[in-house]
Amino acid sequence: MSLVRLLCLVIGASLLSACAPTTPLFIAQITTNEVVEYKALKTKRMTAAIEEEGDLLTYSAMAIRDAHSDKAEALYLDGYRDRQLSGEVRAIALYQIGLIYMNRFNEQRDDPKALNYFYKVLNEFPASQAASRAEERIAMIRQRADEPIHKTSRELLANWQPSQNLDLYKPSLDPDMTLLSRRAVLKGRVDEAEQLYLLGLADPHVPADIKEKALYQLALMHMAADNPRANRDKAIAYLRRLLVQFPESELSAKAARHLDLALNPGMR
C-alpha cells in the first residue's frame, strides 16, 4: 500500500507475557483478563496519543496503538520515495514518522529517530507546511530532554484521563467521519485538517477515489453540529464539487443526501 492509499486512512504492543501459572484454570483466567485489559489499554493508548498530538493521521495513531511503528515507518518511507508525489505530500510522510516516534504514549518511542526525521523534513522540504511544524516538534523534544523525570509510556498512561471534549465516538458526529476529522471538529482544528485534505486534492498524482473521500470529509467537518465554526456554504461547495467532478463516485448517494440536508436544514 502506497502513501496515496494512506491518505484514505487520513481521509482514518505486544501482549505482555505473564509469569507461568501453576494450573490450567489459572492460565485461562489470567489469559481472559489480560485480553480484556489489553483491548482497553490499546484504545486508551490511541486516544491519549491523539489528544497529545493533534497532527497524527489516523494510520499513525493506529500504529502507536498496535505497536507497529516500524511498519508505519516503512509505509510512509514508500510515499516519501515516490517522486511523482508533490513535495508537500512527501514531507508529510517524513513528518508523520517523526510524530509517531516522539509520542510519549508510544511504547516504541525513539526521540533521536524522531529528530532525524524532523531534520530531514527541514533539510529536504524547507518550504513545505510540514517544515514549520517539524521545527516546533524539535523544540518540544529538546525541552523534554531537560526534564528531571522521564516516565515510560505505561506510567504515563496509568495516570492519564481523557479530555471531556475529545469523545471521538460521540453520537452526534457523522459515522463516516475519519478520526482526523472528528478530532479536528472537537478540538477546534478544522482549518488545519482542511489544509491537509486540500494538499491531497492539489496533488495531480493522488488517485481520484482518494480525492473524492477528501472532499467528503471536508464537507462533513464544515457541517458538523459539534463544529462551533461550522460553515454551511463551504460544506455545500465541497459536496457540489464532489458530485460534479466525480459523478460516478461510490460516495455520490451520500454526498447528495448531505447536500439536501445542507440546502434544506429543516429536512430530516
Image: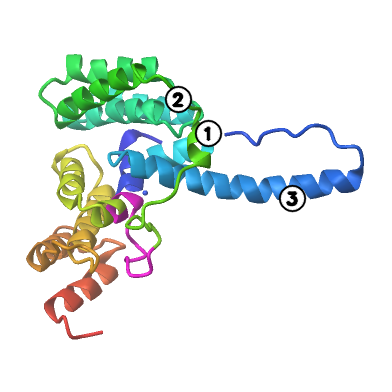
Q: Looking at this rendering, what residue extends furthest in the front direction?
A: 148
Quarter holding the C terminus? bottom left
Residue 122 lies left or right of residue 148; in this view the side is left
Distance between mark 2 and mark 1 Cα atoms = 13 Å
Q: Main secondary structure of the magenta part?
A: loop
**Quadrant location of the N terminus?**
top left
Image position, residue 212 (x, y; %): 24, 54
The residue carrying pointer 2 sits among few (fewer than 14), some (14 to 19) or many (20 or more) residues within 10 Å by Cα, namely many
Any magenta on residue 171? yes
Q: CA distance from mark 1 to mark 3?
A: 23 Å
Asked if one can make out residue 78 in the rendered structure from this viewpoint, the answer is: no
Quadrant hosting residue 240: bottom left
**Hey, which quadrant is residue 218 in on the image?**
bottom left
Name the mark on residue 109: 2
Query: Which residues are drawn in magenta?
Result: 170-182
Q: Amino acid at mark 1?
A: Glu
Q: Earlier in the sequence, mark 3 or mark 2?
A: 3
Per the image, the residue denoted by label 3 is 32
For the residues labelled 3 and 2, the Cα–Cα distance comes to 28 Å
